[in-house]
Image (cartoon, helix red, strand yellow):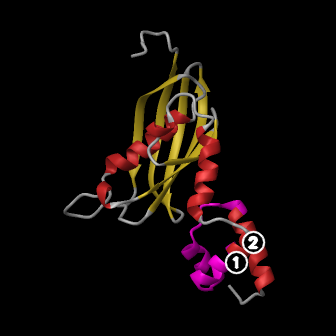
Amino acid sequence: MKKISKLERQKLLQEKLKENPFFIDKELAEIFDVSIQTIRLDRMELGIPEVRKRIKTVAKRANDQLKSVQSEEVIGELVDINLDKAGISIMETSKELLLEKSKVVRGHHIFAQANSLAVAIIDTDVALTGSAKIRYNRPVYLGERLIAKAKVENKKGNKFCVRVETKVKGELVFSGEFIVFSVEADNGIEEV
């Protein structure tokens, strides 16, 4: 990116964060070809909180809409939801998620993020996964941020086809097609 004035950069920064509030300062610094400190100072001047606070604000709104699962049952951080349509969750990788020998994130964690998101976007009291067709495209490593996006592709009666794509820095690392069923709460499922 060519050098631009501070005012222009701050305007573009606001636009970038409106498009995607999940950019971290390091990514923004690379986009604008400035230091991380410059981005932090720009954010402070503009009153834009750091990424964790932006995510928490968005996540609170999303969690308030959940019906089929509790917010703590969603793997990763739910940051956007439009019931029966779409949703987004973010998961930061950590040492606890890794295979000891290879230092690669265990596949079941990536699957769990996608599956829990697919179930969470269904507008019902009880939603259950019937089947899943999944594909891992490449290994995920410590420090990479997984952004999963789910979309209801079609619905027939109580059966939903939900497509989930998980990306790291825009690169597709996992995809899945989940068949999720909406189940009546009184169909043999009892409160404990």
Q: Residue at x 52, y 14 (%)?
A: 184
> Left or right: 17 with respect to 186?
right
**Picture quarter with the C terminus:** top left
Q: Residues within 10 Å of mark 1 (few under 14, many from 20)?
A: some
Which residue position holds label 1?
42
Mark 2 highlights which residue?
A: 46
Which residue type does callout 1 highlight? Asp
**Residue for point 78% across, 87% down:** 5
Tell me the residue at 29%/58% (across/down).
98
Question: Could you say which is closer to the camera, residue 98 or residue 190?
Answer: 190
The vertical placement of 162 against 101, above or below, is above
Extreme left residue here? 101
Q: For the magenta stretch, what is the residue range? A: 18-43
2 and 1 marks in contact (CB < 8 Å): yes
- Magenta segment, prevailing SS (helix, strand or loop): helix
Front residue of 173 and 24: 24
Q: Is residue 112 rendered to the left or right of residue 2?
A: left
